[in-house]
Amino acid sequence: MARIRLLSEDVSHKIAAGEVVERPASVVKELVENALDAQATRIDVRIHDGGQELIQVSDDGIGIAEEDLERAFMRHATSKISSADDLFAIQSLGFRGEALPSIASVSQLILTTRTADAASAHRVTASEGRLDIVPAGSRQGTTVEVRRLFYNTPARYKFLKAAATERREIGELVTKFSMAHPNVAFSLWADDKQVLQTTGSGSQLDAVAACHGWSHAKQLLSLESKTHWGTMRGYVSPPSLTKGNRRDQLLILNGRIIQAPTLIYAAERAYQGMLPQRRFPFLILTLRMDPTLVDVNVHPAKSEVRFQQERDIGSDVHRAVRDTLLANDLSPRLQEQQRPAPSAADWRDSAQTRTGGSGVQQGSFKFDRSPSAGNSQLWTPNSWEAVDSLLQEHAPQYDPAKVRPPLGGQPKKDHGHLEAGQSPAAQDPSAQTPTPHTSQSQPSFGHSDGRGSHKLRDQLLNGRIIGQLHQSFVLLETSEGLWILDQHIIHERLLYERFLKTEEKRPPVQQILPQSLEFSLSESDGIRQHLDFLASLGIELEEFGPQTFLLRGIPQELSQNSGHWQQDILRIVESREQQENWREQAAITMACRGAIKAGDYLDQRQIKQLLTQLAEADNPFTCPHGRPILVRLDRSELLRRFGRT
């Protein structure tokens, strides 16, 4: 009995489809590459349900001649190569002739095409291995509709991701094509909503601006270099503009989007000593070289290539990126934050929000980062942020009777700001003179303490505050010696525990002039899916375009922080999507942002309030990242240092 048999054409097509068509984004990739090879100047992509129900790619290219239509759906039928020698000098994006037959074998496909000299267009319907070709009406170019992807291969269909995930993959792919081919006008529609549009002006920077926002694009540094193997040009980010992943790193070789870890590593190595740990630069590098120096026929998806002179190319990439960085002024600049002009509704809503009361949350720690009261503020656009800050001081706060005490004990009385000329001791005697706590005044920590933890808390409550060192550290005299505490880490720990313990939705503090935040296409898609989750944390975002959101509200604890929120929001969304300690990661991000910073002045009353709340914390030893809150200089060590023992 024969054990080896020849597979049917249908089975062989489906096997080939497994190599070419992995997911909806694979279909889009093959069809867009065909459109680019057809010299298209405009490419429109439409998808429904993440591409599972519909993928449509239309172009204005040269089209397919009527006599070639049937051959176009045969395996290994192509117009791009004719001999084996052509495989080593490939200049087109596609060349294997597998895309259309592979896609048609796992979907219901309709192709409509017309050449410039044809009297009419023709429509090809491919389903279940059959082709039906009929005349049709259409402009010059080609439109391919792919419906019900994997409908006849349920084993493949069940491995597809959620529609939102597949939509994001397609969005990232079209974004990369847009930047790799800036001379082509791309548009992407998802579920009848336009999410991307480029002009096709030929400017790569314009394409970057369309995909990532102009605020992102204008920070990039232009790169251009000539080498013995070809040319290299593109854009790299300054060290101040980084991401937490490598999604925004793009390599383009002769128009083809490729993966080359060696070259990416060489480019990243140029940033050595400039970037924080686990931060990655934005890169777009376009390489042009003789196609005989590279082999693109080494991967089923043609995304990996093999260079003849990979080491030399890597060295040139490193040198070009490094030279670009060093040739520019990389020092950060303080720039006025641009915000959209407020509408009448903004003013009305903000006024209604801010006239609801003037209560102050008890047990909260406040500090002042605003300019001194003596600075006059004129009512001009340049001072709106100051007005916003002033109004936030009088914004309605939590009702203390309705919320959980912030850090486990009873809310402490907020003594308010010191009067002019009043010493800290006059308002709070305990700030200067340690007063032993009796059992009645000892705070309840809400959990059992070991002897060492209890002793530390007692010292925090009864130590004598010496003051600040470099406006960054708190100096505390205790019975054991000198304690040095990091004011930022203290406050970060307090905010972190407060965020974790508050389960209910946090009401945001409304912004009179909301910030306009721009994201990439994939980032905005992820944020859009988690708007309700962000709102539960007190981060209120409103869609203001395909890739733009207005930040209308922020958590009350962070209301005095007016910095850029893009990276923090992305970190929170990424932790949510990973489903790993997402609440804890969100609390860490917001606590780090809201905590007081090194250089913030604190008076003795504020220091006392910090130490009192730290004594009530579940963990008074480290920040959420694991850094120590305090360093001790014991009395015995001081005596030994001065030779008194």
Image (spheres, rainbow, N blue to C red):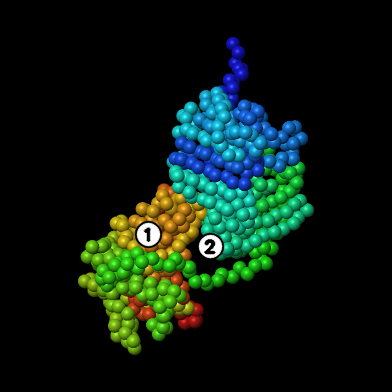
> Looking at the image, how many numbered discs can be counted on the residues?
2
Q: Position of residue 113 (x, y in %)?
A: 59, 35
Q: Residue at x 43, y 53 (%)?
A: 527
Q: Quadrant of the N terminus?
A: top right
Q: Does the CB distance between marks 2 and 1 fall below 8 Å?
A: no
> What amino acid does circle 1 point to?
Glu
- For the view shown, which residue lies furthest in the front direction? 119
What is the x, y in percent for residue 584? 39, 56
Rendered position, 409 above or below 11: below
Instruction: From the top left corner, tell me how far across and down residue 288 is, in percent.
Output: 71, 50
Which amino acid, by three-letter code, is at mark 2? Ser
Spatial distance from mark 2 to mark 1, Cα to Cα? 21 Å
User: Which residue lies at the image location 60% right of the left edge and 33% below the top edge?
Assistant: 120
Tell me the tag on residue 215: 2
Secondary structure at numbered mark 1: strand
Instruction: Specify the quadrant of the image occupied by residue 226.
Output: bottom right
For residue 36, say whether it is visible.
no
Most foreground residue, 574 or 391: 391
Quarter assignment of residue 201: bottom right
Query: Crowdedness of circle 2 by 10 Å Cα count: few (<14), some, many (20+)?
Result: few
* Residue drawn at x 21%, y 71% as measured from the top left: 440
Mark 1 Cα shell of 10 Å, populated few (<14), some (14-19), many (≥20): many
Q: Which mark is residue 540?
A: 1
Q: Quadrant of residue 543?
A: bottom left
Q: Nearer the viewer, residue 330 or 110?
A: 110
Return the residue nearer the eye: 579 or 426.
579
